């Protein structure tokens, strides 16, 4: 069980005076971010949260959510990410199925005799309120960390999955101290959660825009350098007048999903800083991403395989994955089903090809539902 330092604490050592969290009304340095996490860790323990406990989190994208998630990981608890828009019955069914009896949420309508509801404001502290030890910031690679849902399946990732997934992606994406990475997806979804970890791993700024701000408005207001979006979101961005000239702060715009010929031509003609990537919910970060030096003829491929993740193509063209960013398994009651073959390969259901230089091309995606 390899030790891994809490990513926020690690970045607080190297990027202490750099901005960790940026919102419409506040700027939180990494030194302050780390203090908030330590303060919330103490309050979580005081509230009775134990290592290994599954704690639901139903919060909007804000700085408190980022702090509380990092504090839960430091408490060695498992964060079960819940869509705040889900109806109460669905939420309670999902949480009961994974043995979750505590939830951090501000919504009173989720109150239930089967669920201990905790207000996030009660868990926030500016400074640690009890002595903190070096052991508090040292986590283990195999400790379960998050449960997310895809197509109604509960997916369990370890802290090591997130750690190595973020570092592998950042190697290609160059998410580093001074980068400003826009959180454009909700944290209960894997693509939103990935951005949280990628920023913490690279000492970059996590930009949390106002919910009413468009992608284009957010890029301008916050000086965004990195984005991770879908092809549909890129289409909307182009409709809003996005160009490299009008939005010079953007260094890398990663698109996860199939890019059609027409959109591909627009990307090429406008000379946009677009790079493809490919992710699956079962991997803690995109498994392939376009490096900055991607040749023009490979720009619209799904990207080059990230560090800590390997791929091979089955005889039927299916993409198989293996590596340290791959999930622990599907949660089924008290059990975790590993869902890999005897050699550790996971069948994604996606179809594609892999060339000799490890560039992945995806031609068909599995229907993953909601």
Image: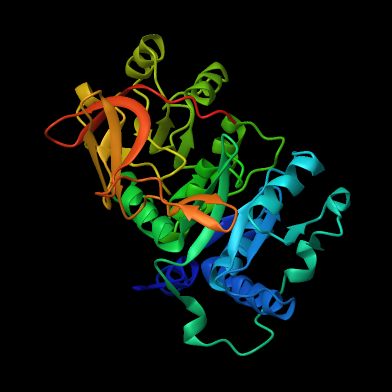
Give whichever of 18, 154 is nearer the camera.
Answer: 154
Please, which residue is most extreme toward the left here?
Answer: 356
Q: Quadrant of the N terminus?
A: bottom left
Q: Quadrant of the C terminus?
A: top right
Give whichever of 263, 305 is nearer the camera.
Answer: 305
Q: Residue 35, position in %: x, y?
A: 60, 75
Residue sitting at x 63%, y 31%: 214
Q: Residue 234, position in %: x, y?
A: 49, 24
Asked whether, in this view, residue 217 is left or right of residue 273, the answer is: right
69 vs 227: above or below = below
Asked whether, in this view, residue 88 is left or right of residue 153, the answer is: right
Please, which residue is most extreme toward the bottom here?
Answer: 131
272 vs 205: above or below = above
Asked whether, in this view, residue 343 is left or right of residue 78, the answer is: left
Give whichever of 104, 266 is nearer the camera.
Answer: 104
Residue sitting at x 74%, y 70%: 123
């Amino acid at each position: 069980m390899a030790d891994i330092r809490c990513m926020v604490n690690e970045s607080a050592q190297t990027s202490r005076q750099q901005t960790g969290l940026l919102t419409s009304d506040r700027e939180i340095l990494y030194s302050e971010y780390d203090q908030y996490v330590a303060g919330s860790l103490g309050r979580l323990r005081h509230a009775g949260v134990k290592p290994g406990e599954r704690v639901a989190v139903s919060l909007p994208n804000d700085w408190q959510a980022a702090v509380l998630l990092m504090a839960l990981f430091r408490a060695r608890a498992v964060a079960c990410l819940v869509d705040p828009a889900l109806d109460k019955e669905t939420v309670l069914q999902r949480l009961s199925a994974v043995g979750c009896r505590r939830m951090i949420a501000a919504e009173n309508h989720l109150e239930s005799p089967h669920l201990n509801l905790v207000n996030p404001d009660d868990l926030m502290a500016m400074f640690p309120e009890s002595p903190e030890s070096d052991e508090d910031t040292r986590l283990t690679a195999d400790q379960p960390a998050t449960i997310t849902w895809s197509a109604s399946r509960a997916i369990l990732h370890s802290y090591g999955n997130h750690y190595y997934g973020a570092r592998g992606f950042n190697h290609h994406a160059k998410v580093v101290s001074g980068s400003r990475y826009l959180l454009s997806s909700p944290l209960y979804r894997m693509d939103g959660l990935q951005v949280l970890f990628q920023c913490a791993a690279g000492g970059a700024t996590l930009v949390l825009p106002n919910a009413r701000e468009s992608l284009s408005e957010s890029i301008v207001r916050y000086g965004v350098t990195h984005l991770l979006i879908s092809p549909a979101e890129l289409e909307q961005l182009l409709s809003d007048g996005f160009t490299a000239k009008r939005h010079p702060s953007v260094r890398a715009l990663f698109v996860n999903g199939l890019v059609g010929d027409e959109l591909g031509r627009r990307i090429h003609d406008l000379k946009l800083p677009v790079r493809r990537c490919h992710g699956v919910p079962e991997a803690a970060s995109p498994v392939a991403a376009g490096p900055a030096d991607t040749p023009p003829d490979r720009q619209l491929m799904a990207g080059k395989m990230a560090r800590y993740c390997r791929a091979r193509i089955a005889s039927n063209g299916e993409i198989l994955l293996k590596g340290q960013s791959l999930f622990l398994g599907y949660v089924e009651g008290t059990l975790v089903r590993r869902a890999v073959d005897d050699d550790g390969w996971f069948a994604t259901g996606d179809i594609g090809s892999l060339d000799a230089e490890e560039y992945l091309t995806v031609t068909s995606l599995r229907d993953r539902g909601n």
